[in-house]
Image (cartoon, rainbow, N blue to C red):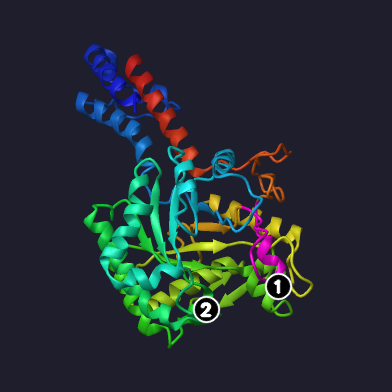
Amino acid sequence: MVLFPLTLPFLDYIIQHHTHSPLYKMEFSSFIVNMPIKPMKFSRFFLRFLLIFSITSLNVLTADAFTGTYGVNYGRIADNIPSPQSVVTLLKAAKIKNIRIYDANQDVLKAFKGSGIEIVVGLGNEFLKDISVGEDRAMNWIKENVQPFLPGTPIRGIAVGNEILGGTDVELWEVLLPAVKNVYSALDRLGLTKKVEVSSPHSEAVFANSFPPSLCNFREDILPFMRPLLQFFSETGSPFYINAYPFLAYKSDPEHIDLKYALFQSNPGIYDAKTKLHYSNMFDAQVDAAYAALEKVGFHKMEVIVSETGWASHGDDNEAGATLENARTYNYNLRKKLAKKKGTPYRPKIAVKAYVFALFNENLKPGPTSERNFGLFKADGSISYDIGFTGLVSSSAPSSLLSFKEIGSSCTLVFASCLAILLLVF
């Protein structure tokens, strides 16, 4: 960063020429609202440290694997969506800094080189049995799909499988942990474990029940596989990733679930008698249910991150709630919530992080109509509905939400500039 080396000699000049001035004894009482404060002396070392800290903190803000709290899943089961290069342009315009893909497509990884957009790649379910056989299989996969693209393409994680535990293929349950360990071991040998996180996202099917949140626990048949997996992730510092969909919950029981509760709108909410906590939306309840389940098996400190959440804008006749307006309401309110960088009722000090599903409507996805209509954007790159993003195609949807990273960087830069001016003046 050019600013840093240029600033040091400039700072030295300021300190050498101004710290011996009588004005170096700064009367803050005349500078800040005339408050009677004793004159203060600052050493040259302190002034130098203060300015260096304010400048270097600009870089610290970009060090996290998950920048901010908002990300998007970039699915590509479609034959009509924009090219990866156009997607980079789209994401930058929308100020989306985190994505997940479900494979390690090399065209995508090449397109994202130098973009600054952080990526979690997927090691598909179809590879797990082979990868579980030995570390050499994992090493070959990483050398082909991850290592060649670093550091230009910021690959921050490998998701090993997707929704394995709780699925119908029990053989995959058995090979998941060996595959995860082999991937991690291969990364470790390559010196990449501090840069690339290993994880495995789960569906709500891993839980025996999730209402109220405090009573959530893992299914008994899954525990023999889940517990050692969690133990390993606890040792490596990986979070618990959950695919949480209020839409699916509402669709399955619209008669008993308040739509407003699912959409973050004003509603009576629910009360958890055990924790004495009130929940005004289902999303928070689903996240806290995961925390409760983790606690019951001894993982009190593991963070929960939502790897998928979203709302379909269109569906079949029997898919309750799948409308354009509901999708807009859910995703707008979710984005607004995440921008506040706050936690849940049960974990108020841990900012909730989530990846929205999905970037595009994917016209080749199998299943009900809703599966092809989760996109924030249409196939041509225009917005599906207005939640403050800007699409590739001109629209009247300017972004009105400033990311916390931008706010932090701006404030830090202003602070550094003001400090430099103060040093010149005093």
Q: Quadrant of residue 322?
A: bottom right
In the rendered image, residue 151, in percent from the top left (x then y), is placed at 34, 42
How many numbered discs?
2
Q: Is residue 426 visible?
A: no
The extreme right residue here reads: 317
- Judged by its main secondary structure, the magenta piece is loop
**Which of 365 and 282 lies nearest the eye of the viewer?**
365
Q: Does the magenta segment cover residue 308?
A: no
Residue 235 shows up from this direction? yes
| Magenta region, residue range | 360-376
Residue 363 among those drawn in magenta: yes
Image vertical order of residue 111 relative to residue 354, above or below: above
- Answer above or below: position of 19 versus 251: above
Residue 193 location, quadrant: bottom left
For this view, does 280 lie left or right of residue 292? right
User: Residue drawn at (70%, 59%), measured in percent from left and top?
Assistant: 327
| Residue 266, percent from left and from top | 69, 63
The alpha-carbon separation of the residues under discs 2 and 1 comes to 22 Å
- In the rendered image, which quarter contains the N terminus? top left
Q: CB atoms at circles 2 and 1 under 8 Å apart?
A: no
Q: Which mark is residue 258?
A: 1
Kind of element beneath mark 2: helix
Pointer 2: residues within 10 angstroms few (<14), some, or many (20+)? some
The circle drawn on residue 205 is 2
Q: Foreground: 387 or 285?
A: 387
Lower sequence index among marks 2 and 1: 2
Give the residue displayed 71% in from the left and 51% down from the top: 384
Q: The residue under label 2 is which amino acid type? A: Ala
Mark 2 or 1, closer to the camera = 2
Q: Amino acid at mark 1?
A: Asp
Of the 4 image quadrants, the one containing the C terminus is top left
Question: Residue, x 26% and y 66% (percent of image)?
Answer: 135
